[in-house]
Amino acid sequence: MGIGLIASIIVGGLAGWIASMIMKADTGLILNIGLGIIGAAVLNMLLGWFGIYAERSWLPQLIVGAAGAAALIAVYRRIKS
């Protein structure tokens, strides 16, 4: 069982916020949540292709979400410039 919808939104928001602090991006609350959730989904999918699975609890998902969101910010900056 996963962490649930409400917890996913909270963890996604925290992950996006952490990524925006690391990457020094100026993003708002909604974008932080979106980056965290999408980043976690994308990175979980990529890691799954290599046989690596993050445990379905809040801390591993927070780490994966922050890393995924930071990657999304980096890709956006690369495309933008």
Image (cartoon, rainbow, N blue to C red):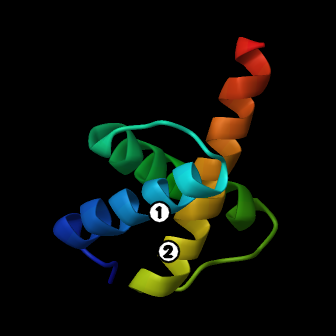
How many residues crowd around disc 2 within 10 Å: few (fewer than 14), some, or many (20 or more)? Answer: many
How many residues crowd around disc 1 within 10 Å: few (fewer than 14), some, or many (20 or more)? Answer: many
Looking at the image, can residue 44 be seen?
no
Residue occupied by mark 2: 61
What amino acid is at disc 2?
Gln
Left or right of residue 8, residue 35 in this image: right
Q: Are marks 2 and 1 in contact (CB under 8 Å)?
A: yes
Q: Secondary structure at mark 2?
A: helix
Looking at the image, can residue 36 be seen?
yes
What amino acid is at disc 1?
Ala
Across and down, in percent, residue 44 comes to 61, 62
Residue occupied by mark 1: 15
Give whichever of discs 2 and 1 has the lower sequence position: 1
Write the residue at 40% across / 82% down: 58
In this view, the residue farthest toward the left is 6
Left or right of residue 33, residue 50 in this image: right
